[in-house]
Amino acid sequence: MKVKRIVANIAAEDVAAAQRFYGEALGLDTLMDMGWIATYGSGESMSVQLSVMSEGGSGTAVPDISIEVDDLEEAQARLSRAGFEPEYGPVDEPWGVRRFYVRDPFGRLVNVLVHLSS
C-alpha cells in the first residue's frame, strides 16, 4: 500500500470565502467547486508529508496548515493586499526556513514558508 495524496480539510460555513485567500492571494487553482466543497490546488508535483507537533517552533502555536512557497515576500504582499496580515514573522528560523503565520478566513493558522539556501 502506498499513500498517494494527503488532503487538508477545513470546516467552513462560507466555502466561497476561501477563494480570496487560497485562490486569489496564494494563487492556487480551483480544482473543484460543488458549493459545499471547494478544492484548491496546483499542478506542481509535491512530496507527501504529515507533521505531528507539540509546538510550532520558536515557542509559537502549532499551525493548522503549512504552505511552502518560492517567494515569501511576494506571498506576504499578496496576502496583505487581500487583507490578511501576519500574526508572526516574517522571521528566519534556526532550522533553515523563513516564515510567517497568518490566519485564513476561517481562523485557521497558516504557516507560510520558504526554505533558505545553504
Image: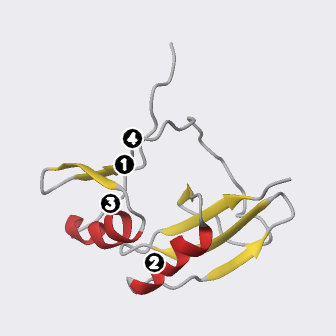
User: Residue 66, percent across and down?
Assistant: 57, 57
User: Residue 31, percent across and down?
Assistant: 25, 46
Q: Is residue 41 left or right of residue 116?
A: left
What residue did someone put label 3 on? 11
What residue did someone put label 1 on? 41
Residue type, label 1:
Gly
Name the residue rendered at 60%, 75% in the picture: 73
The image shows residue 102, relative to residue 10, as above or below, that is below
Q: Residues within 10 Å of mark 4 (few under 14, many from 20)?
A: few
Quick one: 13 or 49, which is closer to the camera? Answer: 49
Q: Earlier in the sequence, mark 4 or mark 3?
A: 3
Q: Residues within 10 Å of mark 2 (few under 14, many from 20)?
A: many
Camera-nearest label, 4 or 1: 4
Q: How many marks?
A: 4
Quick one: 42 or 3, which is closer to the camera? Answer: 42
Camera-nearest label, 4 or 3: 4
Q: Is residue 116 left or right of residue 74?
A: right
Residue type, label 3:
Ala
Verify CB contact (< 8 Å) between mark 4 and mark 1.
yes
Q: Earlier in the sequence, mark 3 or mark 1?
A: 3
What residue did someone put label 4 on? 43
What residue did someone put label 2 on? 79
Verify CB contact (< 8 Å) between mark 4 and mark 2.
no
User: Residue 86, percent across and down?
Assistant: 57, 82
Residue type, label 4:
Gly
